[in-house]
Amino acid sequence: MVGGEVQVNFNALRAAVVIAAVYGHFLIFAQFAFVELLRGGGVHATGERLALGLMAVAGITGGFVAAWRGVGSGMLRIALGVAAVSAGMAPLVGGHAGFGMVAVASGAALGVATVSVSAMLRGWCGVGWVGLGTGSGYACCNLPWVFNQAPSVQAWVAAGFAVVGVLAVPRLRDWHDKNPLESLPWWGAVAMFAALVWLDSAAFFIIQHVADFKAGTWGEAWLWRNAVLHFVVAVAAGCWLARTGAKYVPVVAWVMLALAAVAVNAPASRSLAGWWYPAGVSLYSTALVAWPGWFAGADGTRPAAWRSAGLFAVAGWLASANGIGMAQSLNRVPITLVAIAGVVVIGVAVFSSKNNRRAFVAVGLVVLAAGFGMARDGKALVTSAAERGRRVYLAEGCIHCHSQYIRPGSQDEFLWGAASRVEDVRKGAPVLIGNRRQGPDLSTVGARRSAAWMRAHFLHPRQLVADSSMPSYAALFANGRGEDLIAYLQATGVGWVRGGYAEEWRPGKLAGEVDGAAGQRLFANLCIACHGAEGRGDGPLAGGLKKPPVNLVDGPFVWTAGSDRLESRVARVVKFGILGTDMAGHEVLTDTEILALTQRVLQFRAGQGLVR
């Protein structure tokens, strides 16, 4: 008997390790690293959606194939092996075909693995061990040296999780229960968990892609707290499930997610969201893993597998994909999303139980009322277009390529204006110094670029700057976010006046030494879009500007008046642009390049005998 008891506990521990391996792999790879690898691998938006769609279809198919053939330890080991290989290969492949194969292999492997684990768990361990395994998986993914790694490293970590799972899989121990517990009808469980996954996926995507949301909830400073919180709450959820069943855990999980979702929208309550969100996720995730084996009315591994396949197809793959897809263009968590999920969760709990209906309704009404109040308060903080645009600036990750910090005592002051005051920069929440500067500093861009120029640049960046690495942000203008972003950037130029150095600047190279071919190339790359190939102000973007671009052939050049040489006056316009107009400067060009471009501009007028 003693030896048997030790064996049972050893199997239970191995089962918990397998749960941690499967869901740790799923979280860090399928939901995070793979998406980032797609985006960093040159896959366009349509290709990204196709790859993720293939993964979902393969996952659903894999789950039903596992249920049809009958789950087993051997099948689970093979699935985890495939998951390890596909995750390990993901950073090494490229193109739509390579990523497509990884998506199919990973999806199918995860589909088989999740269904197999849920169906076999009851033969391996008690329901309390599910909380230990789920909490360990979530905790591992939140460890700083995992969460903060590059996507390629995260993919290899996920491959390591899968390998550990292969080694830990216990032998299949079938189970039969003459009196299986059905805590919820099948339709109710699917609807309830689908609503929770849908809400979680949408909220996660929004928080992850809005910088101040992320910093206040699971930023680097909070990762250890989140790891511990995930573990503790999941273990507690496992104990709770063992004592009272699965009906109340999802309801409380929705309460936690709802409070977190509405709290994150307001800076005053954002820190609370960092506690509620991990707690809610761990509660419902533990119940989701345990439900097919203990609470779905199944009397053995095969019926549990079929219930698991159906549950994960709808609540896992489809609800998750729908939640992420819906949140693509959002920069705050809508209270409507929280309310819809709440109606489903509370509705299922009420209509599937004759007891405690009043309690369920009361909890739902209180949370919804609190949510509406918090959402309204959060909305009041973001009223102007410029304030909304700042949120777009953060959500789109503009700080990764642009700075808002003019460094004292550097060339920055000549290019962008007076140096930034450190005390002013630190007042930002968050601080927008920027991670690195691949594009120009944007501290005063509102004075140096007109709204019309910005709009054209967001829509067609390479028409204005041929070698620009900036992607098109045309999608932002489908819902007004693009105009809000422009309003924010325009506000950076309020009260800014370029110093006298612009009027005093002279190019440092004589025109006679200029390379004519370089001027032709620069004009084609930087000027044709507005001024046209023949310099007559009829370029493809000219119609979208406030005033037609200057006709470089016969003018007039009203902005180049002065007593010095025309070449120097035109060079200053080319270098610094014309404040208050759509004529943008080319501050980062060298003097040699400025003079080459200036000479090309003057050649248009020379043909008419107008140079003077």
Image: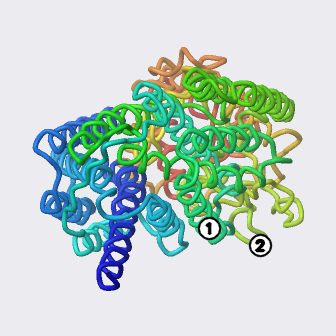
Q: Position of residue 481 (x, y in %)?
A: 63, 28
Residue 506: which quarter of the image?
bottom right
Relative to 473, does residue 587 appear above or below in the rendering? below
Is residue 112 toward the left or the right of residue 235 in the image?
left
In this view, the residue in front, 588 or 444, is: 444
Q: Is residue 113 left or right of residue 476?
A: left
Quadrant containing the C terminus in the rendered view: top right
Q: Which residue is mark 1?
A: 223
Name which residue type carries label 2: Gly
- Mark 2, residue position: 409
- What residue is shown at x 75% (from left), y 55% (from top)? 430
Horizontal side of residue 346 vs 308, given as left or right? right
Mark found first going from the N terminus, 1 or 2: 1
155 relative to 118, above or below: below
The crowding category of the residue bearing disc 2, from other C-alpha atoms within 10 Å (few below 14, some 14 to 19, many at least 20), is: few
- Residue positioned 54% across, 36% down in the render: 196
- How far apart are the two marked residues, 1 and 2, measured between alpha carbons? 37 Å
| For discs 1 and 2, the disc positioned in front in the rendered view | 1
**Residue 218's x, y, as percent?**
64, 59
